[in-house]
Amino acid sequence: MSDGKDSLDLSGLGAAVPNAKELSAEDKANLVESIKNTLQGLAARHTDVLESLEPKVRKRVEVLREIQSQHDDLEAKFFEERAALEAKYQKMYEPLYSKRYEIVNGVVEVDGVTKEAADETPAEQKEEKGVPEFWLNAMKNHEILSEEIQERDEEALKYLKDIKWYRISEPKGFKLEFYFDTNPFFKNSVLTKTYHMIDEDEPILEKAIGTEIEWFPGKCLTQKVLKKKPKKGSKNTKPITKTENCESFFNFFSPPQVPDDDEEIDEDTAEQLQNQMEQDYDIGRADEFLQGKGSRESDLRNASNSKMLPT
């Protein structure tokens, strides 16, 4: 030891973490456990830290380590049971999501609404179907998404008619699907964002993949065209045009890429990817958005029993 600090040799860790692309689905599921086992092995080879402690203090630390081990075992069981419970209730949610879609998009009418609407709607005013701009308003009530939506995005998001979230198994992860009506901005009818994770229960991001948006000419919302006058005396009298990237909700579908193992990823990018994954995890649940609930996963989960519409 030097300067009172213990320096661990982590060179052996690389052998336990092969390229994720070369792993089978089963290997990926076990990768996190392998990393934990490797770290435990490294810790076992550095018992000099414990040996340097007074016997009474060392005994207390050993008991604390046993407590931590028991905690880890319980946590692993919790993640396993939570995944099974989520899968069970996801199937029960589906009929509700289908009913929501039909009401929002005017596929069906709610009992009693048709007659009331006919009585209250002026004759010259066209009766609207469903709930206009439902998803735009839902997203604008979300703490994080409201900051991402720019004013110029709103017209395109009015065509959003549904958001679906579901788990994927090969490889493990989850996917978000944004369904759009035919619109003047882009050709795609569905925009997706997929997260591949090394561990589904205790999420460790492997990579994120978004849809390439097929913008119609002059309609791209993630770029803006700047025009500048040519310099005085220039032979070119035409305005100079320059295209720049700009802030837009639709950048959501172009996530930062996770580098391969032989490349380094900076801390800010890694944090951005992980935070974005956690925020997206429950994005398909409109009830929290409509009520302005918190955006963190834990807040969303705690609010999952709330009513679908504010009272």
Image (cartoon, grey):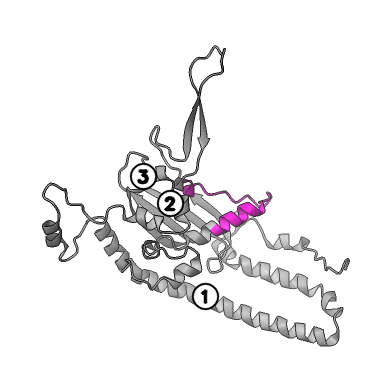
Which amino acid type corresponds to the residue marked 1 in the rendered image?
Answer: Glu
Residue 80: assigned label: 1
Please name the residue that numbered disc 2 is placed on: 192
- Magenta segment: 251-275
In depth, the one of 111 and 48 nearer the eye is: 111
Image vertical order of residue 304 relative to residue 155, above or below: below
Note whether residue 83 is visible: yes
Which of labels 3 and 1 is toward the front? 3
Picture coordinates of residue 162, whole percent (x, y)? 34, 55
Query: Label 3: few (<14), some or many (≥20) within 10 Å?
Result: some
Query: Label 2: few (<14), some or many (≥20) within 10 Å?
Result: some
Image vertical order of residue 156 relative to residue 137, above or below: above
Pointers 2 and 1 in contact (C-beta within 8 Å): no
Horizontal relation, residue 198 to residue 96: left or right: right
Element under disc 2: strand
Which of labels 2 and 1 is toward the front? 2
Please name the residue that numbered disc 3 is placed on: 156
Distance CA(mark 2)–CA(mark 1): 27 Å
Image vertical order of residue 166 relative to residue 190, above or below: below
Distance CA(mark 3)–CA(mark 1): 40 Å
Residue 36 quadrant:
bottom right
Whichever of callouts 2 and 1 sits on the residue coming sooner in the sequence is 1
Q: Quadrant of the N terminus?
A: bottom right
Picture coordinates of residue 18, whole percent (x, y)? 66, 58
In depth, the one of 278 and 210 nearer the eye is: 278
Element under disc 3: helix
Whichever of callouts 3 and 2 sits on the residue coming sooner in the sequence is 3
